[in-house]
Amino acid sequence: MYVYILLIFCCTLNGLVLDKFYNRNSRNFKTLLFITFFLLFIVAALRFEVGRDYTDTYVYSYVKIASGVKNVRMDIALKGIYKIMAVLHANVQWIFVITSFLINYFACKSIATQSPNCKMSFWIYLCGTFYFFSMNGVRQSVAIMIFYYSFKYIEKHNFKKYAILNGIGFLFHSSAILFIPLYFILNKKYKFKMKMILIFATVLATKVIVPFLTSILLQTHYAMYLINGAYSSQDSLNFSMYLNILIFVLYEIVIWMKKSDNNQAIIYSNIHFCGVIVSLLATSLPMMIRIFMSFRYLEFLSVPYLIEIQPKRKYKQLIELAVILLYLVYFIHGVLIENGNTVLPYRTIFNKGW
């Protein structure tokens, strides 16, 4: 527990200092950003039996592949890495070293290039629990972080680089295939009225769409998400979903009040809107909760930007304080009390536990 609290303190403090640098290409900025990345990386990379799927999924799959078992259900990139590791007789810990590097590298690069408030981004990244989710949903977290980093290519109208990045994400988690067509949707400004109609239509269509999707998915390897108890109990909106709806509404208000085409605000609003649609589907199709994660965890970029575009400084400071307290409570409840993603107690490969 204490290692996580110390990590949050150090990364947030580093973020506070990073915000003082006007030139993000300066050596000082890059050095401090690397230190922050290294802290995030090393804690995740050296974990031992931390995360619900650590042993039952990742270690178990590696043992099977190393033993020569064929047809192990796994995405292309991870299976390839496992096979190389097996040939080299490498310790299974290397898969966590590699994935932790990728996740936190793209997270830090996203913050450096897209966030106007590094302090808030690191605070939300950790207290908003994506960091801890990434210790469990390892493959999906790699794909999600690559997706967020690729946003900069939407603004630059560079589909090729956007598609290549999310193609790499697809190799780690097949859900990333959904991100590629979003390139043609996310930077377009849609009327709020049309979005409300789509939300209403989604609520009505769940009675038709959900049974249809269920019948298809039961014939695939995704059936586990329908019959596994961990995914079959989602029958109402949870706090994360309500928070996503709130951020979406706030972005829509800002866009409407400013009456201008702020590309970054439009992209963030559209991502959270996708989250709203998926969260409504998740109330009837539990596996959608994993897809929802792809849109919900954008908060570590979208919330700081939402604060930044608030014109009145006194309101900005109050909002920052409210956000800090909100995510602090979220961290205490979700990690320290409920032990979400089974990240407690924290252990390393060098000791029994901290």
Image (cartoon, rainbow, N blue to C red):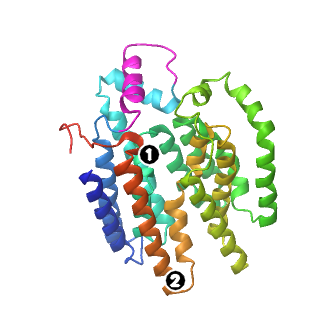
Left or right: 21 in relation to 316: left
User: x, y (%) of residue 335?
Assistant: 38, 50
> Picture coordinates of residue 190 (x, y %)?
77, 64
Crowding at label 2, few (<14), some or many (≥20) Cα neighbours within 10 Å? few
Q: Is residue 58 magenta?
A: yes
Q: Which residue was labeled with disc 2?
A: 315
Q: Amino acid at mark 2?
A: Tyr
Please state which of residues 78 and 290 is positioned toward the viewer in this rendering: 290
Residue drawn at 25 percent across, 40 percent down: 347
Q: Which mark is residue 133?
A: 1
Query: Which quadrant holds residue 284?
Result: top right
Distance between the Cα atoms at labels 2 and 1? Answer: 31 Å
Q: Which residues are magenta?
A: 51-73
Question: Could you tell me residue 161's position as x and y percent?
Answer: 60, 51
Please indicate, yes or no, whether residue 108 appears anywhere in the rendered image.
Answer: no
Q: Quadrant of residue 227?
A: top right
Q: Is residue 195 magenta?
A: no
Disc 1 element? helix
> Residue placed at 77% from the left, 66% from the top?
192
**Residue at (48, 44) in percent of width and height:** 141
Residue type (three-letter) at the residue carrying disc 1: Phe
